[in-house]
Image (spheres, rainbow, N blue to C red):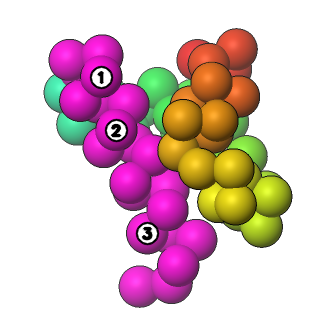
Amino acid sequence: MNIELEFLIYCMEEYKRRHGTTGRDTYHLFEQSGAMRYILNHYDALHTAGVEYTLDDISGML
């Protein structure tokens, strides 16, 4: 597994934990909103800021 994918999964798990959603619902939400693609495409910038910033940054998409 590559590091970008690991970060995406971590972000999704954190979102799921914070919002009490299921894994399936979180996956669909991230996929349909474009958040998955956004996190993977902007990994270099996002991972240095951390998951807090990343989740705040994509909240508008979700």
Q: For the residues labelled 2 and 1, say whether their Cβ atoms are less than 8 Å apart.
A: yes
Which SS class for mark 1?
A: helix
Disc 1/disc 3 C-alpha distance (Å): 18 Å
Q: Which amino acid does label 3 sit on?
A: Glu
Residue at position x 63%, y 39% in the image: 54
Residue, disc 2: 14
| Percent position of residue 15, x then y | 38, 31
Q: What residue type is labelled 2?
A: Glu
Q: What residue type is labelled 1?
A: Arg
Q: Residues within 10 Å of mark 3 (few under 14, many from 20)?
A: few
Disc 2/disc 1 C-alpha distance (Å): 6 Å
Q: In which quarter of the image is the C terminus?
A: top right
Against 44, is 1 above or below? below
Against 24, is 4 above or below? below
Residue 55 as seen in the image, left or right of residue 61: left
Which residues lie in the magenta part? 1-21
Which SS class for mark 3?
A: helix
Numbered label attached to residue 6: 3
